[in-house]
Image (cartoon, rainbow, N blue to C red):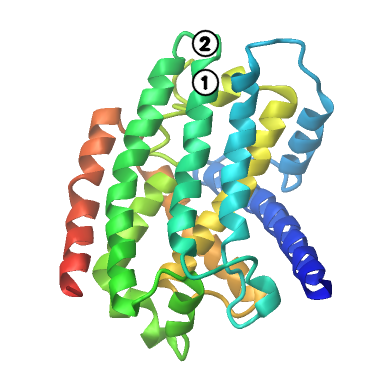
Amino acid sequence: MDFDLKRLGFTLLGLLIVLNWGLLMSALMRKISARVARRIGIPWYQPWVDLVKNYAIRSQITHGVMFYLGPVFRLSGGVGIFLFMPMIAGSELWMNYSFQGDLVLIMYFQFFGMLGMALGAGEGGHPYSAIGVSRGLSQFTVIEVPLTLAIISLAIQYNTLSLVDIVQAQQGGIQNWSMWTNPFATIAGMLSALGTLGHSPFNLVKAPNEIPIGPPTEYHSTYLGVLQTNAAILHVVESALFMNLFFGGATSWFEFIIKTFLIYFWSVFVGVVFPRFRIEQSVGWFLKVPLVFGILAVIMFM
């Protein structure tokens, strides 16, 4: 019982670290994007200010129970991924609740949050909710195809669906990372990461250049705070997922911060360079280049 309570304590501490690192990383990325556009950008502490402000506001608008459960489901997806994501390789207390089939469960949690938001948006009052739902689910479905093929290839290569075992197999030097031992899966996974992390050209749900910019239009006050909390957690744990799959995991929190920053920066860099796709362009793109590399990755280890 003492050990279980100790692990729970470390898990909650890890969640707090991930949340604050996600908030800081989002501020840094917005600062970098602003500098590229020759603007000053936001102060580094702005995400915390926004979070406190939104949680302090109460809403008097009613759209139905499911509408307000959408952000809760979305946050449950992000926290669920964290709970089964090993943070620090070789440290039993920072493994959270990883087990032999955690990769399958993580893939389910990735879709769980998106489905919750779709159900919530369907009960909202915005006339363009259906467009956002169709965009989000269509794109996320095709993102999952090459990513799933990359994961299948790694499962065949390492003969396991445990992230802990996959990370352990990559220890001993950079030459053991999946990036070198399975380059096709790495390319398919990192191209899928562009859509998973949700920056331009794949930010179709928010579509910030249009008047209806997705969930932040309808969700406000505490509900927007929940979505912001989830975004901070989700960006870190999704970056950690790709770190564990392809880049050898992390043996310390310093290494964890550096690697997740670089992986997240990869999506931000592409977002700054390329304009937003239309939905048919996005779907077609994921079913071409990333899918081809995903198929090659599976064939390579058959």
Expressed as whole percent of the image width and height from the top left, the position of residue 208 reads 48, 26
Would residue 280 be visible to someone looking at this image?
A: yes
Q: Quadrant of the N terminus?
A: bottom right
Tell me if mark 2 has few (under 14), some (14-19) or many (20+) residues whose alpha carbon lies within 10 angstroms of its own.
some
Position of 196 compared to 255: left or right? Answer: left
Tell me if mark 1 has few (under 14), some (14-19) or many (20+) residues whose alpha carbon lies within 10 angstroms of its own.
many
Identified at 80% across, 20% down, the residue is 58
What residue did someone put label 1 on?
121
Instruction: Indicate whether 286 appears above or below 118.
Output: below
Residue placed most toward the observer, 189 or 3: 3
What residue did someone put label 2 on?
126
Expressed as whole percent of the image width and height from the top left, the position of residue 230 reads 63, 42
2 and 1 marks in contact (CB < 8 Å):
yes
Instruction: Indicate whether 96 appears above or below 80.
Output: below
Q: Give the mark nearest the N terminus, 2 or 1.
A: 1
Query: Alpha-carbon distance for marks 2 and 1?
Result: 8 Å
Would residue 248 be visible to someone looking at this image?
A: no
- At label 1, the amino acid type is Ala
Mark drawn on residue 68: none
Q: Quadrant of the C terminus?
A: bottom left
Position of 267 compared to 219: left or right? Answer: left
Identified at 63% across, 11% down, the residue is 63
Residue placed most toward the observer, 33 or 249: 249
Expressed as whole percent of the image width and height from the top left, the position of residue 240 reads 53, 63
Identified at 72% across, 48% down, the residue is 44
Identified at 41% across, 39% down, the residue is 200
